[in-house]
Amino acid sequence: MKEYKRLLLNNKAWAAEKLEINESYFNDLALDQKPLFLWIGCADSRVPAEEITQSNPGDIFVHRNVANLVVHTDINLLSVLQYAVEVLEVKHIVVCGHYNCGGVKAAMTNQDFGLINKWLRNIKEVYEKHYQELQQIADEKQRFNKLVEINVLEQVNNLAKTTIVQKAWNNRQYPHLHGWVFDMHVGEIKEIVNINAGEYENPIFSYKF
C-alpha cells in the first residue's frame, strides 16, 4: 500500500468511529469554531497540539512554523494572530517549543543551511542576546535545552509587543500569554512563563490607544 493511502483509510476509520459515538458529531463540528486557545508551535511532526493536550477539534486554533517563532514581519503569523484575537477572541495564546528542537540546534552552529538561514537568524539573535548566560552552562545538552526555553520566553515577549495583543488587552483584558516547552522524552509540558493580560510593561513597545 502506498503511504498516503494509509492516511486516507485511517481518515475513514476515524470518521466512522466518531459517528458511531455521536451521529451528529460532524454536523456539530461544521457549525462554527469558538476555540479558547491560539497555539503557536513548532512544525516538528512529533509535537501535535491537540494530541499532547488531549483536545478535540475546535478547541485550539493552530499556527506552526520552524522553532515556534513570533516574527514581527511574518505576515502569515500576524494574520493568524489578528484573526484569533480580534475575530475568534481567544482567551489564551500558547507558544509551545520542545526540547531537541532542530531549528534551535541549527541556530547554535555556524553551519550554512541555505535559505533557512534567514529564518534561523531570528533564533541566532536570541542566542546572541543571552550568549553570556548560556556560556555559563558547561554541559552542551543543558545549554541547548536552556536556549529552547529562552527562545520560548522571547517569542512570548514578541507577542506582548504587538499592537494586536495590546489593543485586545485595552479593550477586553484578554488574551493571557503562555510559554511552554514539551519534553518528548517523558511526554510532559513544562511551563516557562505566563503573562496575564496587561501585565507586560515595556516603555519602548507600549502603545497608546
Image (cartoon, rainbow, N blue to C red):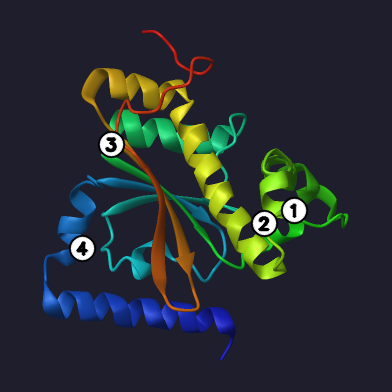
Mark 1–mark 3 CB contact (< 8 Å)? no
**95 to 45, vertically: above or below:** above
Viewer-nearest of discs 3 and 4: 3
Label 2 Cα crowd, 10 Å radius (few <14 / some 14-19 / many 20+): many
| Percent coordinates x, y for residue 148 in the rendering | 59, 56
Q: Quadrant of the N terminus?
A: bottom right
Farthest residue to the top: give it. Answer: 209
Q: Which residue is mark 4?
A: 26
Q: Which residue is mark 3?
A: 88
Q: CA distance from mark 1 to mark 3?
A: 34 Å
Return the disc, 3 or 4, that comes first in the chain's sequence: 4
Q: Residue at x 16, y 65 (%)?
A: 25
What is the three-letter code of the residue carrying label 1?
A: Ala
| Percent coordinates x, y for residue 14 in the rendering | 30, 78
Disc 4 is placed on an element classified as helix
Label 3 Cα crowd, 10 Å radius (few <14 / some 14-19 / many 20+): some
Mark 3–mark 2 CB contact (< 8 Å)? no
* Relative side of 186 to 89, left or right: right
